[in-house]
Amino acid sequence: MAYGELGRFNLESLVMKRMINYWLRVAQSKNSKLSNIVYKLLRQLNDNGIFESKWINKVKECLDNCGLSNVWQNPSEINPIWLKNSIDLRLSDIDKQNWKQEVDRNNLCTNYRMFKTDSGFEKYLINLDFMDYRALVKFRCGNHRLPVSNNRYESDSVQNVCTICNTNDVGDEFHYLFKCPSLVNERKQLIKPYFYQRPNAIKYKELFNLTNKKQLRNLAKFITYTVSLF
């Protein structure tokens, strides 16, 4: 979830980009250069099964995963700028797919995937004061003590019921934002009626994707008050 909020991806991708760029520079360097001579010898030994080079195999694996096996076969004919752009694009696509799959299958992300469908930097992180964006990001990422967090990985929801009202509803983020009767006054003061009147998944997503600074600040204040109750 932190990667999704920041629009960042696995550090491994950055390492792979640099590894591929370095490999191409060595492979395309002059035949008289020591690095080129060592590389060709290392690749020959690796291809013949005499010596296993983890670096050589990792470069080949990355190119194969990116659908660029032809680059491995003929590095001398490759345009470095084209390869750099291609690797950036394809590794970025792979990272986005992996992030989406992880969010979809992780039980901790049940709430998160309702409003966050694509990885990308959230502007509230720079538009709000520290205390406000801190409250918002922790709530979005499930880093709180609401009842639902006590047993989120279990199927039994009995332990997750709201402890500040008698509705017996699950004490999750949706309940406190839109429904909990104990927060009626704070809700009326800080959240627009459009959201908590006939609430649904669409309004929930809209609320967490607000761009108006005042509305975001009010939402952060409501969240801060809510989590302080637990």
Image: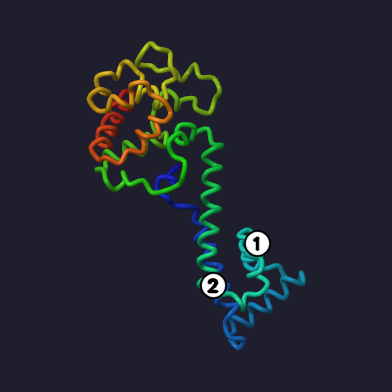
In this rendering, position of residue 129 left or right of residue 44: left
The quadrant the N terminus occupies is top left
- Image quadrant where residue 65 sits: bottom right
Furthest residue toward top: 166
The residue depicted at 31 percent of the width and 23 percent of the height is 229
Q: Could you classify mark 1 by the number of other residues whose Cα lies within 10 Å: few (under 14), some (14-19), or many (20 or more)?
A: some
Looking at the rendered structure, which numbered label has been put on residue 64?
Answer: 1
What is the three-letter code of the residue carrying label 2? Tyr
Q: Is residue 23 above or below residue 172?
A: below
Q: Residues within 10 Å of mark 2 (few under 14, many from 20)?
A: few
Task: Give x and y (percent) for residue 146.
Answer: 39, 25
Tally the numbered discs.
Answer: 2
List x then y, in percent, for residue 86. 54, 64
Specify whether 68 is left or right of 44.
left
Q: In the figure, residue 53 lies in which quadrant?
A: bottom right
Mark 2 vs mark 1: which is more N-terminal?
A: 2
In the picture, the quarter occupied by the C terminus is top left
Q: Residue furthest bottom?
A: 32
Disc number for residue 22: 2
Secondary element at tag 2: helix
Q: Residue at x 27, y 27 (%)?
A: 192
Between 163 and 30, the residue placed more toward the observer is 30
Frontmost of labels 2 and 1 is 1
| Residue at 27% across, 38% down | 132
User: Could you say where residue 96 lies in the image, as x and y percent from the top left?
Assistant: 51, 49
Q: Tell me the amino acid under the disc marked 1.
A: Asp
**Residue 98, position as x, y percentages in the image:** 55, 47
